[in-house]
Image: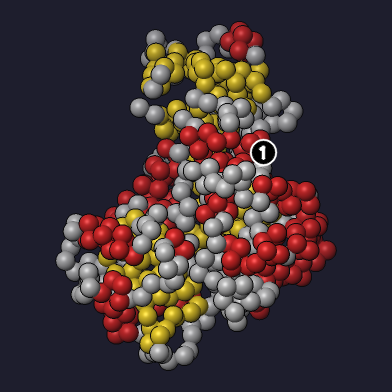
Amino acid sequence: MRRCLLAMVLGAMSGAGLAAEVTVLTADRIHTSDPRRPQVQAMAWDSAGRLLALGNAAELRAKYPQAERVEAAGKTVIPGLIDAHGHLMGLGFALMRADLTGTRSKQEIVERLRAYASQLPKDAWLLGGGWDQNDWPEKRFPTAADLDAAFPERPVWLERVDGHAGWANSAALRAVAAKSARSLEGDWQPDGGRIERAGGKPNGVFVDGAMGLVYAVIPPADDATREQAAAKAFDAAVRHGLTGVHDMGVSREDLALFKRFADQGRLPLRVDAYADGDGNALADLCANGLYRHSGGRLEMRGVKLYIDGALGSRGAAMLEEYSDDHGNRGLLVTDPASYETAVRKARGCDVQVATHAIGDRGNRIVLDTYQKVLGDGAGSDHRWRIEHSQIVAPEDIPRFARLGVIASMQPTHATSDMPWAEDRVGPQRILGAYAWQRFLHSGARLALGSDFPVESVDPRLGLYAAVTRQDRDGQPPGGWQPDQRLSAAEAVRGFTADAAWAGRDEKEVGQLAPGLRADFVILDEDPLAVPAAQLDELHIRSTWVDGKPVYEAR
């Protein structure tokens, strides 16, 4: 039996009807991410999807003469790409709402919303996301009035690109006010959040913890819609070469949904689910033990906690005030004492801790808490993580390695934020921002991801951003803070072997080596050889999980 990769189509050239016990793939080059044998031309795996051998094409063909063959002449194979920080249900729902990504003005947003609203039932909420006021001429938060003329009666709720702020029209404000236990007016603020007001009245923008006031009145998605969202997210992930995702913030209900997909053989990639804070999912882990599905594609062994907000909405907790917003030091979305209690609970249940921290104050609180809770166990193989590690005081960077803390970072955040990030924090603090090489040189481990749907699910954009530190137009020349660029090999490792290690999966995936899973991607180009400017345009021919194609380009 023989399968050949020809032009745009991977087709099966079959002889016998029975499945072969072994498959041998040959390609121009196979990058393994295994330092002991970084490049080969062939690999073999068994019917269970476990790699048996890697090496010379002629040797493997001779060793397995009856094997099914996959010929990828002219192609490059790399280990399956793993996004170390994404949100699958968030991606699925984003694909089902108005997409405001890349909009350059409020008027453009209204035009997109009108087009999208034309297909909605008359009484449905108009939901969207992806706006960023930093991309508009005025660079200020919008107001409800900016939406009211176009949508006087239909409630509108639009999430900011980072998911840490939302924009409501007056109809949505009326819906919230009708069910809120407290008037939205005045000078009070909800815990861990902020209601933007003018003259004591809400102006339509809710930040971080305040957003829950709006979510409480939006009709929840039904089971069919949730299943559709999950299916769309899984499909988008494998189409872009992802064979694994660390899904940050998964509820008990979402884990049950993913489990149904896994039970039915419909889960096309590996999902490392992290429980959504100190809630039901974490309680289940403490009561029942760490979860792993028998099919090997779904697990929950960690918890995602929050300490602060986001930089774009000035909610990241800073040691000093924002350079462009005097008096504002950001938000702590979790009280430090409550946060420490949750960390201690997770440690007592042997649950891996991953914490969202963006500002330098947020990162310091997390590091201090980890050090306090771990105590003498800081040198153990705990693999606790800080998600984003975005603005870190330079003196705190060496603490990551000393405490064994993984810096889970997203390269495209740097290139999205670079036009305004220094305005937020000034020329000195920016030296500890998106500081990938400073982390590596300190001995810290990096795990790379995207934070989709905040950024694109496409890992090629992450590779490009990591290596160039430029936008897709090649700006700025030479890259932003170019001394922090990663090499192509470092970037690929961050999305493969290092991401697998961060998820405690290095004995299963992340490299191509005997005994590991046959998770890989076939590309037209070699990401370690093409010019850096072409990394965002790599052509994915197919994505494989457990030795089977889960996506094939047509």
Image check: 445 left or right of 460?
right
- Return the x and y of residue 14 as percentages of the image width and height: 39, 13
Amino acid on which the number 1 mark rests in the picture:
Ser
Residue 501, compared with residue 171, is above or below; it is above
Q: Which residue is mark 1?
A: 487
Residue 192, compared with residue 99, is above or below; it is below
Between 510 and 96, the residue placed more toward the observer is: 96
- Return the x and y of residue 295 as percentages of the image width and height: 50, 41
Residue 280 visible somewhere in the drawing: no
Between 275 and 536, the residue placed more toward the observer is: 536
| Residue located 45% across and 67% down the image | 139
| Residue located 79% across and 52% down the image | 442
* Residue 18: quadrant of the picture: top left
Looking at the rendered image, the quarter that the N terminus falls into is top left
| Residue located 52% across and 17% down the image | 74
Circle 1 sits in a helix, a strand or a loop, which is it?
loop
Residue 21, compared with residue 93, is above or below; it is above
Between 404 and 184, the residue placed more toward the observer is: 184
* Residue 62: quadrant of the picture: top right
- Return the x and y of residue 473 as percentages of the image width and height: 49, 43
